[in-house]
Image (cartoon, rainbow, N blue to C red):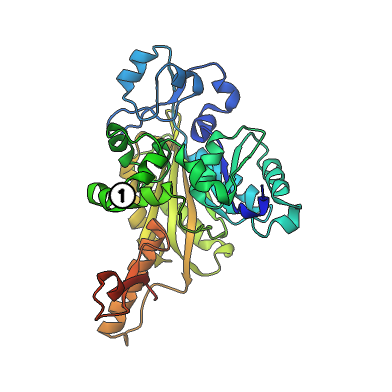
Amino acid sequence: MSAGACLVVCVRLPRFELVVAAGGAEALAGRPVAIAPTGSGAPLVGEVSGTAQAQGVRQGMALGEALARCPALVLVPGDPLKVAQTWETTCRALEGIGALVEPAQPGLAYFDAVGLGSLHGDLYGVIAASRKALARPARIGVGPARFCSLAAALESRSRRARVVDAREVRRYLAVQPVGLLEFREQTAPLVPALERLGVGTLGDLARLGAAAVADRFGKPGTCARQLALGHDGPLRPRRVEDTLSESMDLAESNSGQALERTLRVLVDRLLARPERRGRTLRAVTLSARLVERGTWRERVVFRQALSDGHRIGLALSLRLALLPAPAEALHLTVEQFGPGGGDQGTLLDGERTARRQRLQDAVSQVRVVAGPYAALQALAVEPKSRVPERRVVFTPFQK
């Protein structure tokens, strides 16, 4: 097997959120444990331990059904704040070995091994360096694309990576269950329907006609079939930026006005930090440590990059109403910076310039929320072509 043909490394930390919320993997040993439902929506359990899963409890199951199947089920409150902090530390540990990391979700990340071999010897040296940086058991899979490396990581052992050669991708994916599609947001809703239709493996899906799949499932079905055939998009490594954070403990009185005053103080402190270097704020994370254990976390993307403390405070104060319980501490963290300078335009800006600026701000906001390929523009290539697909193509919107 040629290790050089394998490019994408998938690092998976099983039950990451549950391990963090429970206080460590030792708390799950031999115990049926699950993350308690949140206060909003239907009461559905979160991640479950291996013991609870063996008794029929699964993530997303209704709380009543979970307790009926496992009366001894222990519920622990979720801790999204600590999960985010621990996951950020984990990603930075991988970046410490020279990797450009694409974090898919807490406990799942990808990076390209090309170029790291000169630093660590070969592919297996890169894998060893990753395990050493993580300093915790991890399942690692390697393949020519993200989806293939994910499948390899799911069946790998904690001390031995699974490497899939580029020439074996289709044959390897053909025997994988369609449940693998649940790890992609776009294709996850298709899994129950495919299983009801008797499509149990990715090979069964790949053997279906492209037209039939597109007609039945639309664009998500086409994407799922492409993944089953071994085709996947390129990696999208995250941009590593400075981390600025401020926090403050709350007094016994944590009413609405007290929370808003505390939030304004955090905003002023954050804007006064010299590390900001005059940059505006594009996205921030507002989080809280709750009195009744657990934490709360909300990501806020501003419609326009801001540096005005009053406007930032107004935008964030609306999110305080989403707190599920009284808080004993507030945290504010900058997730992404915007360009330098203030927010106010000049009086000489015309209507066309102002509209252009609003369009640029909207595109920046969409890309922060949905990724760099979320905003596209239509480019006429062959307007007189008889093939509709050749008349217009979509390219990333250029500011």
Q: How many marks?
A: 1
In what element is the residue under mark 1?
loop
Mark 1 crowdedness (10 Å alpha carbons): few <14, some 14-19, many ≥20:
few
Q: In this rendering, does residue 318 appear at all?
A: no
Horizontal and vertical percent for residue 329?
Answer: 47, 40
Amino acid under disc 1 = Gly
Horizontal and vertical percent for residue 223?
Answer: 36, 52
Query: Which residue is depicted at the point 28% across and 77% down?
Result: 355
Residue furthest to the bottom in view is 348
Q: Of 74 and 81, which appears nearest the observer? A: 74
**The C terminus is located in which quarter?**
bottom left
Q: In this rendering, would 110 be left or right of 397? A: right
Is 334 drawn above or below residue 353 in the view shown? Answer: above
Asked where in the image residue 308 lies, by quadrant, the reply is: bottom left
Asked where in the image residue 69 lies, by quadrant, the reply is: top left
Asked where in the image residue 242 lies, by quadrant, the reply is: bottom right
Query: Which residue is depicted at the point 31% across and 49% down?
Result: 209
Query: Which residue is depicted at the point 55% across and 43% down?
Result: 87
Query: Which residue is depicted at the point 43% across and 42% down?
Result: 183
Horizontal and vertical percent for residue 48?
Answer: 45, 26
Horizontal and vertical percent for residue 184?
Answer: 40, 45
Residue furthest to the top in view is 71
Q: Which residue is mark 1?
A: 209
Q: In this rendering, would 174 be left or right of 344? A: right
Q: Of 251 and 245, which appears nearest the observer? A: 245
Q: In this rendering, does residue 266 appear at all?
A: yes
Q: Of 196 and 63, which appears nearest the observer? A: 196
Is 239 drawn above or below residue 136 in the view shown? Answer: below
Is 368 drawn above or below residue 348 in the view shown? Answer: above
